[in-house]
Image (tube, rainbow, N blue to C red):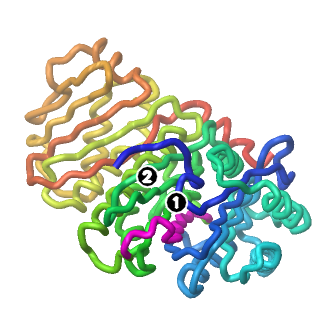
């Protein structure tokens, strides 16, 4: 497997576009399209929030029941959540309009939205935007980049990645893009994420791969502890790589899953590091846990701790906050048997062990915690299970950004 340039247009047969439609933002791209020249198998995971946006309801039904999909329309600025029957009608109108222009059924069109909750989407601007997207769509890397930029809301950077992997003697490509900066605490995936691939894989195995992957990728990140109404991850596979169809758990399936996990983990970390107001990516790796689930729970408890996140922002080696977060996670352990380390590109430091603080330099610890990527390594000494979670620090700007988000 090797990383290559690009995002959702890297795989064979995929086109994309990003245009300015004036949905909510002015003078910036705010609508995107992903399109496959042939039909695709589709898989997805969606928010566990009881309050689900209209596009989530639409896409969930399409992924579960439609024989194939071929296009995705995405808008930023307005979430189309808590919009009642009108919101659902909007999804259907956009899918139907797009389908007619592309000569595909409405059931082959997925629709996604992100932005402010409670506002109705302007259908006239959306349909005009669809026309612009169809005229602009291309298979170039630049077109994929335009799409990645168009789905951003409070994101400060676009997020995309692509890889190549050999499967069944054929070169298979996977590309992805996502957006997410606030309201990030997924219990399925990210706020909005899209992966395209030319792999030939059955719908059953594609869904299995996606559902199992998010447990250790998108489900292991948190920015603010808020699970969005719009969380969606969609994966489209058009089979143009012409590898033998993956129908079972074999070596080809394993290779595909490894490539998918590389994509999703990369994107998940990009989101965590781009949390609203964030100055640092904060990673917690738990090793030596009794079970995999214990490791996941412990790691995520630490990166979700507001006090710990604030300490990371202040470059303060306040390890007591990490021990506290481990302690209320719900996992039973002996605190006298835990080792805690801080690590970054500036070095690694043993900060806590045998139930007490280690003899360390506060100045050196501050130096380690001042880097843009910081890791807390926790050894539980209870088994061989491990897991990693990703979050970010908590800065003054987080409150500023969210205090006036609607305006």
Q: Which of 327 and 10 is in front in this view?
A: 10
Instruction: Say which quarter of the image contains residue 344.
Output: top left
Calculate the distance from the C-alpha at mark 1 to the C-alpha at mark 2: 8 Å
| Residue 372 is inside the magenta segment | no
Q: Would you say the residues marked 1 and 2 are in contact, meaning their CB atoms lie under 8 Å apart? A: yes
Mark 2 residue crowding within 10 angstroms, few (<14) / some (14–19) / many (20+) = many
Specify whether residue 366 is in view. Answer: yes
Question: Which residue shows up at 85% across the image and 41% down it?
Answer: 27
Q: Which of 246 and 336 is in front in this view?
A: 246
Counting from the top left corner in percent of width and height, residue 143 is at 68, 48
Specify whether residue 220 is in view. Answer: no
Q: Is residue 406 above or below residue 72?
A: above
Counting from the top left corner in percent of width and height, residue 377 is at 23, 37
- On the image, numbered disc 2 is attached to which residue? 263
Residue stretch in magenta? 230-244
Badge 2 element: helix
Left or right relative to 44: residue 126: right
- On the image, numbered disc 1 is attached to which residue? 195
Q: In this view, does 212 lie above or below 288?
A: below
Q: Is residue 247 above or below residue 337?
A: below
Mark 1 residue crowding within 10 angstroms, few (<14) / some (14–19) / many (20+) = many
Badge 1 element: strand
* Total labels drawn: 2
């Amino acid at each position: 497997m090797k990383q290559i340039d690009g995002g959702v247009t890297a795989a064979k047969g995929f086109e994309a576009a990003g245009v300015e439609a004036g949905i909510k933002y002015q003078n910036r791209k705010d609508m995107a399209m992903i399109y496959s020249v042939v039909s695709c198998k589709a898989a997805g995971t969606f928010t566990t929030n009881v309050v689900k946006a209209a596009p989530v309801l639409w896409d969930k039904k399409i992924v579960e029941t439609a024989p194939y999909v071929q296009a995705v329309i995405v808008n930023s600025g307005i979430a189309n959540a808590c919009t009642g029957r009108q919101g659902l009608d909007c999804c259907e109108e956009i899918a139907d309009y797009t389908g007619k222009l592309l000569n595909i059924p409405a059931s082959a069109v997925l629709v996604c939205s992100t932005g402010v909750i409670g506002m109705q989407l302007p259908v006239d601007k959306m349909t005009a935007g669809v026309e612009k997207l169809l005229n602009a769509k291309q298979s170039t890397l630049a077109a994929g980049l335009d799409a990645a930029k168009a789905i951003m809301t409070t994101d400060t950077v676009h997020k995309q990645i692509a890889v190549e992997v050999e499967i069944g003697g054929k070169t298979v490509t996977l590309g992805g893009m996502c957006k997410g900066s606030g309201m990030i605490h997924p219990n399925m995936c990210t706020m909005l994420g899209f992966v395209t691939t030319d792999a030939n894989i059955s719908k059953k195995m594609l869904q299995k791969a996606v559902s199992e992957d998010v447990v250790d990728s998108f489900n292991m990140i948190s920015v603010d502890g808020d699970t969005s109404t719009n969380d969606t991850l969609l994966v489209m596979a058009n089979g143009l790589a012409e590898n033998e169809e993956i129908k079972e758990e074999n070596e080809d399936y394993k290779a595909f899953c490894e490539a998918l996990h590389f994509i999703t983990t990369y994107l998940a970390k990009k989101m965590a590091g781009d949390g609203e107001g964030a100055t640092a990516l904060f990673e917690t790796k738990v090793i030596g846990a009794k079970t995999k689930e214990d490791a996941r729970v412990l790691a995520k408890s630490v990166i979700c701790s507001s006090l710990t996140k604030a300490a990371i922002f202040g470059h303060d080696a306040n390890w007591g906050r990490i021990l506290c977060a481990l302690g209320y996670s719900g996992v039973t352990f002996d605190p006298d048997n835990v080792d805690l380390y801080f690590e970054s590109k500036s070095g690694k430091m043993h900060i806590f062990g045998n139930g007490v603080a280690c003899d360390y330099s506060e100045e050196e610890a501050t130096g380690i915690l001042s880097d843009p990527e910081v890791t807390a390594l926790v050894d539980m000494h209870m088994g061989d299970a491990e897991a990693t979670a990703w979050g970010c620090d908590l800065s003054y700007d987080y409150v500023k950004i969210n205090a006036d988000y609607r305006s």
